[in-house]
Structure formats: structure tokens, C-alpha cells
Amino acid sequence: FPSHDIGVAYAEVETFVNDVSAFSLKTNDQTDGYLQVILRYPEGELSIEAKTMADTILASFAIGQRITYDGQSVTVNRKSRAKGANEAGWYKLVLRVFFTAVLPR
């Protein structure tokens, strides 16, 4: 796990992107992937805090929403939250926001 303060809730954030493929003959490619957020709360704390944070994060991404950053846009397709689990002294929740993107060549 990344370094963090013992007993303090934290999040691990990572983006997973699939291979890029042709979208048009000359100008664009496409890809898809997902943003993954793993929330970790100290085991023994109320899991409702982690679930509330998960709901807040997922509410930030609407299905069909187009998000643009630094000239690149993605469209949110779906989102998910796995059932929480205790792992190595932490209560863990995994969130995923799935997207597609059209990329200029």
C-alpha cells in the first residue's frame, strides 16, 4: 500500500485504459477504460462513513457526462461500487467509473 498515516482513512486512485483503436479513417482513435478509487477506512470505524464517501464520489460522475481536462474528453458510461470488505486492518470499498474517449491522432 502507498505510505499513509496509520489509522487515517485514505484513497488510492488509478486509471486503467485499454488499447487504442481506429475510430475514423484519418483523424481519430478511440479507447475505453475506468477510473478506480479504493477507499480504505480503519477497521472498526463505522462503515457508513466509507459508504457515504463512496456515494459522494460516485455522485460526481453522471452517466453520459462528458468530462474534459487539458484538451482530452471522456464520456462516462457506467459506474460501480463493490461490496465492502475487511482487509489487513482496513475496511475497503472499490469504486469504478467506466468511460470511453475519442482521441485525435
Image (tube, rainbow, N blue to C red):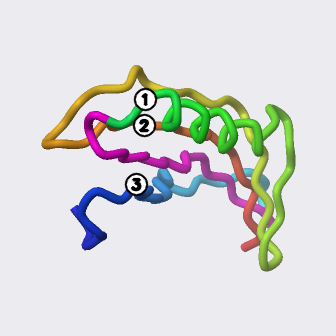
Tell me which amino acid carries mark 3.
Ala
Sequence-wise, the earlier of marks 3 and 2 is: 3
At horizontal 29% and vertical 69% (from top left) the residue drawn is 5
Quick one: 41 or 24, which is closer to the camera? 41
Residue 50 vs 37, above or below: the answer is above
Using the image, tell me which numbered label, if any, was put on residue 7: none
Q: Say which residue label 1 marks.
A: 47
Q: Which residue type carries mark 1?
A: Ser
Which callout, 3 or 1, points at the residue further toward the start of the chain? 3
* Residue interval drawn in magenta: 26-44
Q: CA distance from mark 3 to mark 2?
A: 14 Å
Residue 94 - label: 2
Give the spatial CA distance, label 2 vs label 1: 13 Å
Eye-nearest disc, 2 or 1: 1
At label 2, the amino acid type is Val
Q: Residue at x 75, y 54 (%)?
A: 74
> Is residue 91 located in the magenta-colored stretch of the structure?
no
Using the image as rendered, state which of residue 37 and residue 46 is in the foreground.
Answer: 46
Reading the image, the residue beneath label 3 is 9
Q: Secondary structure at mark 3?
A: loop
Percent position (x, y) of residue 85? 29, 26
Label 3 and label 1: CA atoms lie apart by: 11 Å
Figure disc tally: 3
Closer to the camera in the image, 73 or 25: 73
Q: Position of residue 16 (x, y in %)?
A: 46, 53
